[in-house]
Image (spheres, helix red, strand yellow):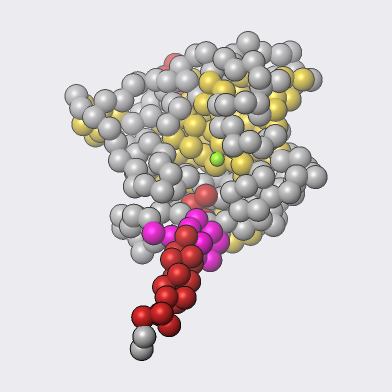
Amino acid sequence: MKMHSLLPIGLLLVASGFAVAMKFGEKPDTPQLPGVEWVVHDGTRPQPKKVETSGVVSVAPPADAKVLIGADGSDAWTNESWKLVDGVMTVGKRPNRTKDSFGDIQMHVEWRVPADREVNGQSGGNSGIFFMGKYEVQVLACYENKTYPDGQAGAMYGQFPPLVNASAKKGEWNSYDIVFKAPRYEGEKAVEPAKLTVFHNGVLLHNAKEYYGPTQHKKLASYPDKHPESAPITLQDHNDPIQYRNMWVRELSDYDQQ
Ligand code: MG
């Protein structure tokens, strides 16, 4: 076979190589995850089962909660481009961090993707909640939209898909009820990983699931040598006008944890 006849095939392979990335149904060229047969952002990983719910579970802040987004307005945040109107905060430009730092917390939050928003995979309906600014719980329009399972709504991004897909439709509010436990260090060694429990619209997504390390994109997560005991919560700007309301936290370090 002459060289020139191979050329188009070679070009085709290169082109498809670029296309094989981070999509539903496709296996990207990313690192192997430990203990499972999948790679990071693996589009061939099974899609979590869809579970229809009655929608948002709204819980008013209990007496010992710190309100981060609420009806009375809030000065809890550092980024003024994220507007808070009538208790609803909309994603602005660049991430938004809390002024306060947090370690172990319980969080309640409600979020939605605008009804008229066009979404496609990770585009159009994407934000995220980063505990300690490092550990993401994904926020994404996922009622009909398909993406790689470790990137869908409620995923421990790039690590663990949610147990099920409990997403509400675009335009409808979702709730997350979350318990986050910070990693424990002895010197420069992580002796206990960060742990996450999440309920989405009242349905369990993660049960004290251990993070491999701080969230990464296309990389395998691992624990750094140095780690703060507490840090601000960060909300992600992914260029989509996701809305948040009724966000409050309870600081679990206030209580004896057995
Ligand atoms: Mg995100």
Q: Is residue 149 above or below residue 62?
A: below
> The N terminus lies in which quarter of the figure?
bottom left
Q: Main secondary structure of the magenta part?
A: loop
Camera-nearest residue between 204 and 45: 45
Q: For the point 46% across and 17% down, which residue is it? A: 101
Expressed as whole percent of the image width and height from the top left, the position of residue 153 reads 59, 47
Q: Quadrant of ligand 1?
A: top right
Q: Position of residue 234 (x, y in %)?
A: 52, 26
Residue lying farthest bottom? 1
Q: Pick the residue in front: 103 or 127.
A: 127
**Residue 203 in view of the camera:** no
Report the side of 30 relative to 47 (left or right).
left
Region of the chain picked out in magenta, as a range: 19-29
Q: Residue 118, percent across and down?
A: 73, 49
| Residue 26 magenta-highlighted | yes
Q: Is residue 109 magenta?
A: no
Q: Quadrant of residue 38?
A: bottom left
* Residue at (74, 13) in percent of width and height: 72
Q: Could you tell me which quadrant the C terminus lies in? A: top left
Q: Is 211 displayed left or right of 204 in the figure?
A: left
Image height check: is 102 above or below 38?
Answer: above
Residue 157 falls left or right of residue 72? left
Q: Position of residue 20 (x, y in %)?
A: 48, 62
Would residue 221 be visible to someone looking at this image?
Answer: yes
Q: Which residue is found at the position 35% from the left and 60% from the top?
A: 36
